[in-house]
Image (tube, rainbow, N blue to C red):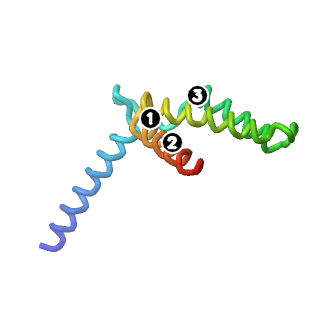
Amino acid sequence: MLYYHYHLFNSIMQNNIKRVYKYFFYDKSGKPVIWQIPNIPLLIWLGFRILSFLKIFPDYNSMFNQIGTGFLFIWAYLELTQGVNNFRKLLGLIVLISLIFSSY
């Protein structure tokens, strides 16, 4: 009897994990999307972060950080509203919330 309950519980958990995985990582057409080429705002943010980190223009580091943060905000908003799957939308929401709280 105990074995039956364990097997039933294990089966239910595996089905739930598969459903959650599909919910987060599959797009609307049913294809899994784990990785995609970064969007333009994310690449621009990365460029400004590199410029800020290298301190090539030390007088402009604050400006580079602010512009980079603006592009990261744009990327997070676009992911939240137009993300290809629910994982990307959740990632956009987490980045947006962290940007909002880090600004205070």
Q: Which residue is mark 1?
A: 80
- Distance (Cα) linking label 1 and label 3: 13 Å
Q: Residues within 10 Å of mark 1 (few under 14, many from 20)?
A: many
Identify which residue is drawn at 86% across, 39% down. Answer: 59
Identity of the amino acid at label 2?
Answer: Leu
Q: Callout 2: helix, strand or loop?
A: helix
Q: Nearer the viewer, mark 2 or mark 3?
A: 2
Above or below, 3 against 50 in this view is below
Q: Which residue is mark 3?
A: 39
Q: Nearer the viewer, mark 1 or mark 3?
A: 1
Identify which residue is drawn at 26% across, 50% down. Answer: 15
Identity of the amino acid at label 1?
Answer: Leu
- Distance (Cα) linking label 2 and label 3: 16 Å
Q: Residues within 10 Å of mark 3 (few under 14, many from 20)?
A: few
Q: Position of residue 64 (x, y in %)?
A: 74, 36
Above or below, 17 against 43 in this view is below
The quarter of the picture where residue 28 lies is: top left
Identity of the amino acid at label 3?
Answer: Asn
Of 99 and 31, which appears nearest the observer? 99
- Distance (Cα) linking label 2 and label 1: 9 Å
Q: Residues at badges 1 and 3 in contact (C-beta under 8 Å)?
A: no
Q: Callout 1: helix, strand or loop?
A: helix
Can you name the residue that lies furthest to the bottom here? 2
Q: Which residue is mark 2?
A: 96
Identify which residue is drawn at 48% across, 38% down. Answer: 34
Q: Position of residue 19 (x, y in %)?
A: 29, 45
Above or below, 32 against 103 in this view is above
Q: Residues at badges 2 and 1 in contact (C-beta under 8 Å)?
A: yes
Q: How many tags in the picture?
A: 3
Q: Callout 3: helix, strand or loop?
A: loop
Q: Which mark is residue 18?
A: none
Of 11 and 43, which appears nearest the observer? 43
